[in-house]
Amino acid sequence: MLRWLMLWSIGAFLAGAEEASVPSPLLPRGADPSVAFHQGEFLLIQSVDGRDLVLRRATHLAGLATAPKRSVAPPLCCNVWAPELVRLRGHWWIYYAKDDGTNAHHRMFALESAGDDPAGPYMDRGKVATKADDLWAIDGAAFESGGKLWFVWSGWPVDHDGQQNLYLAPMSDPATISGPRVLLSQPDRPWERRGLPLQEGPQPLIRDGRLFIVYSASGSWTDDYCLGLLTFTGGDVLDAKNWVKSPQPVFAKANGTFGPGHNSMVQDATGSWWNMYHAIDETGGGWNRRSLRAQPFGWGADGVPVFGQPRARD
């Protein structure tokens, strides 16, 4: 018990020191961060100018602010959005959305690392889509649960804009969807419908055998962009009745910080959990004023993540 308390104290001290060193914002411009932690390094991937995928890596979270950017793929066309960096079965995968110049043609695509280096080189694995439901899709991420692979993403219910839902499908491998999409959740709460009825940016979160999906709700250009939470209660992952939605946002505007959303979560070497997200500093700031933030989060006695409130700007 004494040894456990000593290790916990050391971890808490290191996490506190790390938190104190992370400025708010971490990066003055940016959106849709995807962050991972591997072999003592934080890894951050971003889309730049809607065509380049760049990776930053640093031993400390604060170091991402000044870390050099490295392109991990040749320039892509067009409107490349929200890359997700995920390590699955010994390889790194980058999932990203792109189109041919027309937003309605957005689909998900995948890159696979040749080895176990997150900087690549990467191989193009093509489009990630269901054969029966090849519709508009963004913000996809693969994850493993129950020994099986799954793909979750944000999509249109039909072939035109107006609402975004969350969809889930099984995978036979990290590049291949092997079944029809299932409607996991739709924006049916008032706090999910500001601007437009939208759910996007789904982020799988697994801890102690429990599965959650943190997602972003309402229009990303509004002050009311926020995070919601789906909790898996057991049974068939593809049955929407086995998922419970938080009645209210789990992370929303506060402390002069507006539109906090499209997050990514990572556990560091001390065991501490971090929430990286984008936000805006002033009401009505919209897409062009977004910056990247990072702050720790905890867990309730019921094992559910507790995100608190966004930090104020330094």
Image (cartoon, helix red, strand yellow):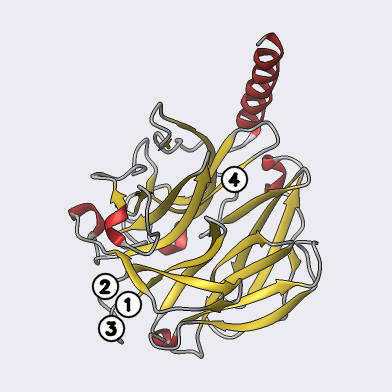
Q: Which residue shows up at 43% across the image and 88% down it?
A: 105
Mark 3 Cα shell of 10 Å, populated few (<14), some (14-19), many (≥20): few
Which comes before the other along the chain, label 3 or label 2? 3
The residue tagged 4 is: 266
Quarter of the image for the N terminus: give it: top right
Mark 4 Cα shell of 10 Å, populated few (<14), some (14-19), many (≥20): some
Q: Which mark is residue 158?
A: 3
Q: Which residue shows up at 25% across the image and 62% down it?
A: 187
Tag 2: amino acid:
Gln
The residue tagged 2 is: 163
Instruction: Measure how far apart labels 1 and 4 are at the Cα level.
Output: 28 Å
Instruction: Measure how far apart labels 2 and 4 are at the Cα level.
Output: 29 Å
Visible residue check, residue 75: no
Residue 26 position within the rendered picture, expressed as x and y whole percent measured from the top left:
59, 45
Instruction: Measure how far apart labels 3 and 2 are at the Cα level.
Output: 9 Å
User: Looking at the picture, does residue 262 appear above or below residue 162?
Assistant: above
Instruction: Measure how far apart labels 2 and 1 are at the Cα level.
Output: 6 Å
Which comes before the other along the chain, label 3 or label 4? 3
Residue 292 position within the rendered picture, expressed as x and y whole percent measured from the top left:
54, 51
Which comes before the other along the chain, label 1 or label 4? 1
Look at the numbered discs 3 and 4 and tell me whether their residues touch, using CB distance below 8 Å: no
Residue 66 position within the rendered picture, expressed as x and y whole percent measured from the top left:
73, 49
Tag 4: amino acid:
Val
| 86 relative to 230 in the view: left or right | right
Mark 1 Cα shell of 10 Å, populated few (<14), some (14-19), many (≥20): some
Mark 2 Cα shell of 10 Å, populated few (<14), some (14-19), many (≥20): some
Q: Nearer the viewer, residue 26 or 197?
A: 197
